Image: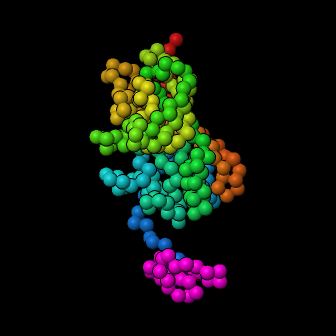
Amino acid sequence: MIEAAQILVDDQQVKSGYRLRDQNTISVIFPPPQASPLLPERIDFPVLFEDDHLLVISKPPGLVVHPASGHHHGTLVHGLLYRCENLPMGDEGRPGIVHRLDKETSGVMLVAKTELALRTLMADFKNRKIQKTYHALLLRCPRERDGRIVMPVGRHPVDRKKMAIRPAHGKYAATNWHVLENFSNGWCLAEIGIETGRTHQIRVHLASVKSPVVGDLLYGGSVGRGGKVQPSRQMLHASTLCFNHPFTGQGCCFTAPLWGDMQEALDILREKTP
């Protein structure tokens, strides 16, 4: 903007690095917003809450959050543009998006409808002011009913589609678990809290303690053909999100009910557990 003469000092163009003085007047000419190349598409998703500042939804499993390689249409972002006009443009051209869920993970998500909400919520996520609770079916139950994993997570050194525990090159990540139910086939239902939000964090951390998420083929959660439950995706659900409203400051908590396929799996497991 400085180089394009959109930031002036005393109505004059100056170079970046110019030393300002007490009496200088700085004017900024904001360029018109660029039209988004994304086209709205009708995408169905349950809405848990909506006001002028934000939208709280329950993301269906199988829905990609934003366009990326191999997913140029039919994403949540396309659906948001269909539902809401003039969403603020987030980082990397993702309108309204302040955080993400993996494609096959279902559950509660926050969407910003104003610039204030976008910047405030993004900062709150970065500063770990937002509490996130997940529920997962685990292929093998951890040894302890409660536990905490603190291991750095980073990109896998060989398989670029995966993340991994990277002691030297990963970022700090912390995950807590609490086992809620045990089932006769060795699986369990766990409540999971995350203190950080690294890519694939829950999946990588639980796999590292030999308790991968059921149905997570990338991290060792595949299920044998003979089982009564044959999941078509990883059984991981973002259940609850608690945060301060970006405009009013009021504390808010929203819960997304388990998606139908995960609830059905639980019903079958409970029938077979004495």
Q: Position of residue 224 (x, y in %)?
A: 33, 22
Question: Going 35% across and 29% down the picture, which residue do you hit?
Answer: 220
Image position of 256 (left or right of 162): right
Give coordinates of residue 150: x percent, y percent: 50, 33
Q: Is residue 25 above or below residue 184?
A: below
Q: Main secondary structure of the magenta part?
A: loop
Q: Within the magenta stretch, is there residue 12?
A: yes
Q: Nearer the viewer, residue 146 or 111?
A: 146
When asked about the image quadrant of residue 210, the answer is top left
| Picture quadrant of residue 193 | top right
Which of the pair 154/32 is nearer the observer? 154
Q: Is residue 82 visible?
A: no
Residue 236 horizontal/vertical position (percent): 47, 34
Point 45% across, 72% down: residue: 34
Which residue ends up furthest to the left in the rendered image?
Answer: 158
Relative vertical location of residue 72 with respect to residue 193 in this rendering, above or below: below
**Residue 89 within the segment the image draws in magenta:** no
Residue sticking out furthest to the bottom: 11
Q: Which residues are magenta?
A: 1-29
Relative horizontal placement of residue 183, taking residue 160 as reference (left or right): right
